[in-house]
Image (tube, coloured by chain):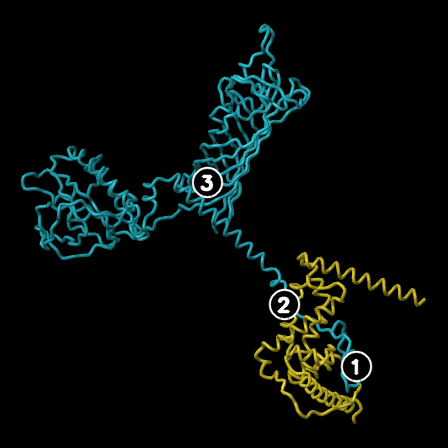
């Protein structure tokens, strides 16, 4: 039975990849219907990615637009070995980082100053909130903290990779991330307390 | 990172990060519709660019066609007549420009005006100032106002007893003036008024020669030209360099005839001389015969054959007769450029591709070389493939022409109540390719030899286009079209006299400016 399930999953995965490859080929031919289909397939998730890096929905849509233009422009560089969604996600993240660097509204707050002393929290609180609520909390962080937290905690980049992407030291990335993590955990806890008070009438 | 999986850094538990990662992994937000529109617009901007490129190419073709049309079919005189400055004032009655000759030219050389200007006896310069005549307070001997502005020189005017004796002098004067005018063709656009003045002056001069007493400001300006000894009106002929006087500034101090348009408002020139282009499609039947139009509907003509290539040997034997030619479908397609000449007439020049077909019965095809004798050459000619005489198969001969038609279109009603026009013209066509067969009576075979054709054809065209549909951007016309080849289709009359006929329906679409 397990073998059949594995075979079924494997076949389904192959089918999905075949459909993705066909979609990519059609997009490379310039067919607008295929491009629209690819956009519709990934736009919602990618907007969520862009939303976490920016401070407004308008900025997020600007990043999304820029990102998809890059996707279609460089679609010929996509290697069919990897997952198409992951490839598009990486493009969106890079586009978001570039957007933060170039946009004047974020440049002033995008500081990666090296914090000599940073608090270390080993807490791992539970997350009893919706994804959008958590995303909104992440967006409350200063832009520098926000970017580093997204890159490490959500996207899974190492601090070495983050340092290369943002042009900072690995240590700076670590310290910035720890600070961001501490802030976020504090807000999450406060949010949980507020929710309990609201629901139960007491913390 | 190849896969979206969190790897905790040293010192990190990673549990919180994993929870955040899992929470964020499936988060979705719906984008607005404008995002895709902008993405699509950025991905496919080439279409708009291509449209501009197409319009640019069409515009370039139109400009080139109009330039060729203008230089080939419009004379320089007509150019002068059509290119009239915007500030031109016209006589509402005669539709002639309102011109007032320079008054000083009318003066006798021995009359000096009170401003003290002298008039050297030199040929006039070609330089003309097209500004308004300045109103001066100079007076003549009669106390009348006279313009002292004179940028020209006048030739010493001879005395004539009467207007008739002045005609030879006027003709000689024309010969002198016109070459000088033509030499000044390089004058810029701002001086077109000058050329127009000259053309008008030329016309005025002609009027003087032919009808010296009608509308002749020179003759009518008797106050200055009267001599003491002669009270007869002397047409003082001089190089007239009339100046354009804006409306309301008519100076009648010389007793000149007052043109009615001087008191009327300016009449703007109606520029209907626009050039438009369109495309044409014709379908019908073509035939080749010695002259009868019935060949279009009947098989009355024999195939092209060499009557002089008689079979050798017993001349009492009957000469094999080739099969008859049947008319076949014909087709024309092309582009044209049309220019309105006046309210009634327009002219068009085009470039067409013509396909004419004829058919006749032949025998089986033989793919081998044979030598045929011809009246055209003393030597025999080697033919690689040929058809035997017979009726076993139908052979369709195709003639591919490139044609340059020139047509004159005349409306039957100027106000377009009757939407029918008459078009007449000619065309020059060149046979580019053909698979037509000639019959050699000596050998009794059909073979292809395009050198036996007269490749350059002159055709007479006529038609009755009817306006079917008219819109803001285009005009659709259709109607019968007839074409006759004036030149012989065969290069040597010894082989016969064949002319192409074409009768069909012509449909044309003329594009208009919005």
* Residue B136, horizontal then vertical, whole percent: 16, 57
Chain B: what color? cyan
State whether residue B23 is above or below residue B456: below
| Between discs 3 and 1, the one toward the N terminus | 1
Report whether B224 appears left or right of B444.
left
Q: CA distance from mark 2 to mark 3?
A: 52 Å
Q: Which mark is residue B19?
A: 1
What mark, if any, has residue B417 been given in the picture?
Answer: 3
Q: Chain A is which colour?
A: yellow
Query: Could you tell me if residue A140 is visible in this image?
Result: no
Residue A147 image point, x, y percent: 67, 80
**Is mark 1 in CB contact (under 8 Å) with mark 2?**
no
Q: Secondary structure at mark 2?
A: helix
Crowding near the residue tagged with mark 3, few <14, some 14–19, many ≥20 C-alpha atoms within 10 Å: few
Location of residue A184 with respect to B377 vertically, above or below: below
SS for callout 1: helix
Compared to residue B18, the image places residue A92 above or below, namely above
Residue A190 in sight in this render = yes
Q: Earlier in the sequence, mark 2 or mark 3?
A: 2
* Residue B34 - label: 2
Circle nearer the viewer, 3 or 1:
1
């Amino acid at each position: 039975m397990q073998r059949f399930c594995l075979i079924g999953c494997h076949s389904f995965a192959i089918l999905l990849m075949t459909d993705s490859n066909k979609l990519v080929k059609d997009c490379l031919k310039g067919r607008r219907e295929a491009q629209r289909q690819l956009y519709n397939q990934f736009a919602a998730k990618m907007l969520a990615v862009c939303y976490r890096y920016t401070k407004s929905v308008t900025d997020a849509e600007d990043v999304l637009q820029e990102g998809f233009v890059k996707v279609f422009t460089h679609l010929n560089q996509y290697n069919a070995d990897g997952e198409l969604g992951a490839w598009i996600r990486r493009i969106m993240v890079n586009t978001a980082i570039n957007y933060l660097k170039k946009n004047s509204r974020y440049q002033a707050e995008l500081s990666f100053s090296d914090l000599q002393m940073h608090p270390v929290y080993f807490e791992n609180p539970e997350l009893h909130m919706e994804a959008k609520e958590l995303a909104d909390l992440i967006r409350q962080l200063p832009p520098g903290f926000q970017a580093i937290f997204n890159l490490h905690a959500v996207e899974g980049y190492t601090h070495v990779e983050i340092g290369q992407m943002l042009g900072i030291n690995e240590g700076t990335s670590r310290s910035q991330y720890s600070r961001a993590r501490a802030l976020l955990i504090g807000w999450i806890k406060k949010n949980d307390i507020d929710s309990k008070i609201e629901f139960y009438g007491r913390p | 990172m190849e896969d979206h999986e969190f790897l905790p850094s040293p010192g990190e538990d990673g549990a919180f990060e994993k929870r955040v990662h899992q929470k964020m992994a499936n988060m979705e937000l719906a984008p607005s519709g404008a995002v895709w529109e902008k993405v699509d617009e950025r991905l496919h901007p080439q279409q708009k660019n291509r449209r501009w490129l197409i319009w640019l190419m069409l515009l370039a073709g139109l400009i080139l066609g109009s330039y060729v049309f203008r230089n080939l079919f419009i004379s320089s005189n007509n150019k002068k007549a059509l290119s009239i400055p915007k500030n031109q004032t016209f006589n509402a009655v005669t539709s002639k420009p309102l011109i007032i000759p320079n008054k000083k030219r009318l003066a006798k050389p021995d009359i000096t005006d009170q401003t003290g200007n002298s008039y050297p006896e030199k040929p006039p310069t070609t330089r003309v100032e097209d500004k308004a005549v300045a109103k001066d307070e100079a007076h003549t001997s009669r106390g009348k106002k006279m313009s002292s502005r004179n940028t020209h020189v006048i030739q010493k005017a001879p005395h004539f007893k009467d207007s008739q004796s002045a005609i030879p002098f006027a003709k000689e004067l024309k010969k002198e003036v016109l070459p000088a005018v033509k030499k000044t063709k390089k004058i810029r656009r701002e001086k077109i008024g000058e050329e127009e003045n000259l053309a008008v002056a030329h016309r005025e001069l002609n009027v003087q020669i032919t009808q010296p007493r009608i509308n002749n400001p020179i003759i009518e300006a008797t106050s200055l030209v009267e001599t003491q000894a002669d009270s007869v009106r002397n047409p003082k002929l001089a190089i007239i360099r009339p100046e354009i006087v804006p409306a309301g500034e008519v100076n009648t101090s010389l007793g000149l005839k007052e043109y009615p348009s001087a008191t009327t408002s300016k009449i703007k020139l109606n520029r209907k001389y626009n050039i438009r282009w369109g495309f044409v499609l014709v379908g019908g039947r073509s035939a080749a015969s010695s002259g009868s139009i019935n060949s279009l509907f009947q098989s009355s003509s024999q195939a092209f054959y060499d009557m002089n290539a008689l079979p050798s040997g017993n001349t009492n034997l009957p000469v094999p007769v080739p099969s008859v030619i049947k008319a076949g479908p014909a087709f024309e397609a092309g582009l044209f450029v049309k220019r309105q000449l006046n309210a009634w007439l327009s002219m068009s020049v085009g470039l067409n591709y013509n396909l004419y077909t004829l058919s006749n019965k032949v025998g089986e095809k033989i793919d081998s070389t044979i030598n045929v004798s011809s009246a055209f050459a003393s030597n025999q000619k080697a033919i690689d493939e040929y058809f035997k005489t017979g009726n076993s198969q139908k052979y369709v001969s195709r003639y591919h022409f490139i044609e340059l038609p020139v047509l004159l279109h005349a409306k039957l009603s100027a106000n377009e109540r009757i939407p029918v026009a008459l078009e007449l013209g000619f065309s020059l066509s060149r046979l580019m390719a053909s698979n037509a067969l000639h019959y050699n009576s000596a050998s009794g075979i059909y073979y292809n030899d395009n050198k036996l054709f007269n490749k350059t054809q002159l055709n007479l065209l006529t038609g009755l286009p009817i306006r079917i549909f008219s819109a803001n951007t285009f005009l659709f016309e259709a109607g019968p079209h007839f074409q006759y080849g004036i030149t012989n289709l065969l290069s040597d009359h010894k082989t016969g006299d064949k002319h192409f006929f074409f009768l069909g329906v012509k449909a044309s679409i003329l594009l208009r400016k919005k």
